[in-house]
Image (spheres, grey):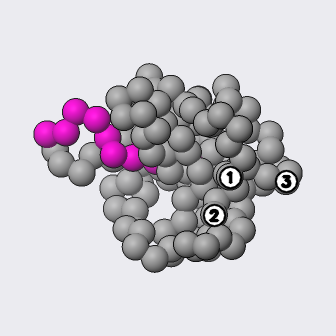
């Protein structure tokens, strides 16, 4: 478990909407993930810090992404200020240029989803968006 700082970004509303569930809206470069309105900065920080870091290379000091699961939804976080802060949004693997989650990462996230009582929702998210 990391000790990372979540950063929404000043005035940033791109990945948040008025509904209390995660979803997507069309964007110029493909679907844009929207976080539930109930995710506060404190919850987002917890989601981030309970995530699974993804390293491009085994000898990297910092992950390039962090994958998390919350209420069965997969979230992807990327650095906003490398080494300092992260910004997250709902993940979907069926977007152009997106690499699929590895089997190892899916298994790690499944364990977390099951522990939270959202294993079925997690599997549905993967079915709908992988």
Q: Position of residue 103 (x, y in %)?
A: 35, 62
- The quadrant of the image that shows the N terminus is top left
Q: Residues within 10 Å of mark 3 (few under 14, many from 20)?
A: few
Q: Is residue 106 above or below residue 124?
A: above
The residue indicated by pointer 1 is: 14
Distance in Å between CA atoms under marks 3 and 2: 14 Å
Query: Mark 3 against mark 1, which lies toward the viewer?
Result: 1
Quarter of image, res 102? bottom left
Q: Is residue 59 above or below residue 18?
A: above
The residue indicated by pointer 2 is: 32
Residue 18 is left or right of residue 39, and the answer is right
Residue 19 visible at all: yes
Residue that extends furthest to the left in the rendered view of this protein: 59
Q: Residues within 10 Å of mark 2 (few under 14, many from 20)?
A: many
Q: Which residues are magenta?
A: 59-69
Pointer 3 or 1: first along the chain: 1
């Amino acid at each position: 478990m990391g000790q990372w700082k979540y950063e929404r970004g000043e005035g940033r509303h791109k990945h948040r909407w008025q509904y209390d569930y995660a979803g997507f809206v069309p964007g110029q470069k493909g679907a844009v993930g929207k976080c539930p309105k109930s995710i506060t900065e404190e919850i987002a920080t917890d989601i981030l810090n309970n995530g699974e870091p993804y390293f491009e290379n085994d000898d990297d000091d910092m992950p390039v992404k962090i994958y998390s699961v919350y209420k069965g939804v997969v979230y992807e976080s990327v650095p906003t200020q490398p080494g300092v802060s992260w910004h997250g949004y709902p993940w979907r693997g069926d977007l152009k240029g997106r690499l699929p989650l590895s089997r190892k990462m899916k298994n790690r996230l499944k364990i977390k989803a099951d522990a939270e009582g959202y294993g079925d929702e997690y599997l549905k998210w993967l079915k709908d968006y992988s």
